Protein backbone atom coordinates (compact mmCIF):
# COMPACT_ATOMS: atom_id res chain seq x y z
CA UNK A 1 0.00 0.00 0.00
CA UNK A 2 2.95 2.32 0.63
CA UNK A 3 3.90 2.24 -3.07
CA UNK A 4 0.33 3.14 -4.03
CA UNK A 5 0.46 6.22 -1.79
CA UNK A 6 3.71 7.29 -3.45
CA UNK A 7 2.05 7.01 -6.87
CA UNK A 8 -1.08 8.87 -5.84
CA UNK A 9 0.73 11.84 -4.31
CA UNK A 10 3.72 12.15 -6.64
CA UNK A 11 2.92 14.87 -9.17
CA UNK A 12 6.57 15.17 -10.18
CA UNK A 13 6.63 11.54 -11.29
CA UNK A 14 3.27 11.95 -13.03
CA UNK A 15 4.45 14.94 -15.07
CA UNK A 16 7.59 13.03 -16.00
CA UNK A 17 5.45 10.13 -17.25
CA UNK A 18 3.17 12.52 -19.14
CA UNK A 19 6.15 13.95 -21.00
CA UNK A 20 7.76 10.55 -21.48
CA UNK A 21 4.54 9.27 -23.05
CA UNK A 22 4.83 11.99 -25.73
CA UNK A 23 8.15 10.50 -26.86
CA UNK A 24 7.65 6.76 -26.45
CA UNK A 25 5.31 4.13 -25.11
CA UNK A 26 5.19 3.75 -21.34
CA UNK A 27 5.74 0.39 -19.70
CA UNK A 28 2.66 -1.34 -18.35
CA UNK A 29 3.57 -0.37 -14.79
CA UNK A 30 4.20 3.28 -15.73
CA UNK A 31 0.92 3.42 -17.58
CA UNK A 32 -1.01 2.09 -14.58
CA UNK A 33 0.78 4.46 -12.20
CA UNK A 34 -0.06 7.43 -14.40
CA UNK A 35 -3.71 6.39 -14.73
CA UNK A 36 -4.04 5.99 -10.96
CA UNK A 37 -2.49 9.39 -10.36
CA UNK A 38 -4.55 11.16 -13.02
CA UNK A 39 -7.74 9.64 -11.62
CA UNK A 40 -7.30 11.68 -8.46
CA UNK A 41 -5.24 14.75 -9.38
CA UNK A 42 -7.02 17.54 -11.22
CA UNK A 43 -3.82 19.59 -11.54
CA UNK A 44 -2.04 16.80 -13.38
CA UNK A 45 -5.13 16.21 -15.52
CA UNK A 46 -4.88 19.84 -16.62
CA UNK A 47 -1.12 19.49 -17.16
CA UNK A 48 -1.77 16.38 -19.26
CA UNK A 49 -4.24 18.23 -21.51
CA UNK A 50 -1.92 21.22 -21.89
CA UNK A 51 1.05 18.98 -22.63
CA UNK A 52 -0.86 17.18 -25.38
CA UNK A 53 -1.92 20.49 -26.95
CA UNK A 54 1.62 21.86 -26.86
CA UNK A 55 2.99 18.63 -28.32
CA UNK A 56 0.51 18.76 -31.21
CA UNK A 57 1.33 22.43 -31.85
CA UNK A 58 5.06 21.69 -32.00
CA UNK A 59 4.51 18.79 -34.38
CA UNK A 60 2.36 21.00 -36.60
CA UNK A 61 4.98 23.76 -36.51
CA UNK A 62 7.71 21.37 -37.67
CA UNK A 63 5.42 19.92 -40.33
CA UNK A 64 4.54 23.39 -41.65
CA UNK A 65 8.20 24.47 -41.62
CA UNK A 66 9.22 21.40 -43.63
CA UNK A 67 6.50 22.08 -46.20
CA UNK A 68 7.51 25.73 -46.55
CA UNK A 69 11.17 24.81 -46.96
CA UNK A 70 10.37 22.43 -49.78
CA UNK A 71 8.23 24.99 -51.64
CA UNK A 72 10.56 27.99 -51.30
CA UNK A 73 12.71 28.40 -54.37
CA UNK A 74 14.96 31.23 -55.42
CA UNK A 75 13.93 33.25 -58.46
CA UNK A 76 16.06 32.47 -61.53
CA UNK A 77 16.92 36.16 -62.03
CA UNK A 78 18.05 36.42 -58.41
CA UNK A 79 20.27 33.37 -58.86
CA UNK A 80 21.82 34.85 -62.00
CA UNK A 81 22.48 38.22 -60.35
CA UNK A 82 23.97 36.52 -57.30
CA UNK A 83 26.25 34.40 -59.47
CA UNK A 84 27.43 37.52 -61.32
CA UNK A 85 28.19 39.30 -58.02
CA UNK A 86 30.16 36.32 -56.80
CA UNK A 87 32.20 36.18 -60.02
CA UNK A 88 32.85 39.95 -59.88
CA UNK A 89 34.01 39.62 -56.28
CA UNK A 90 36.38 36.79 -57.22
CA UNK A 91 37.78 38.75 -60.14
CA UNK A 92 38.42 41.82 -57.97
CA UNK A 93 40.57 39.82 -55.55
Image: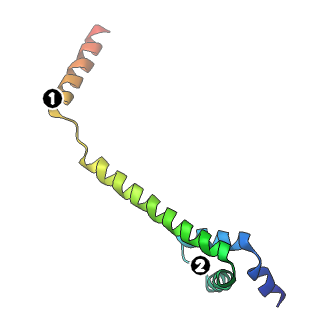
- SS under mark 1: helix
Quadrant of the image occupied by residue 34: bottom right
At horizontal 59% and vertical 78% (from top left) the residue drawn is: 26
Q: CA distance from mark 1 to mark 2?
A: 53 Å
Earlier in the chain: of badge 1 and badge 2, it is 2
Please tell me which residue lies in front, 8 or 13. 8
Q: Position of residue 14 (x, y in %)?
A: 68, 74
Q: Position of residue 66 (x, y in %)?
A: 34, 53
Mark 1, other Cα within 10 Å: few <14 / some 14–19 / many ≥20: few
For label 2, the residue is 26
Please tell me which residue lies in front, 46 or 29. 46
Label of residue 77 in the image: 1
Asked if disc 1 and disc 2 are in contact, CB closer than 8 Å, the reply is no
Relative to residue 65, is residue 2 depicted above or below? below
Q: Residue furthest right?
A: 2
At horizontal 57% and vertical 73% (from top left) the residue drawn is: 21
Image position of 87 (left or right of 8)? left
Scheme of colours in the image:
rainbow
Amino acid sequence: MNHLKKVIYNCKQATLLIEKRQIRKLSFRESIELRVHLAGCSMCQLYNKQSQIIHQMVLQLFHDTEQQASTLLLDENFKKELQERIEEGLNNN
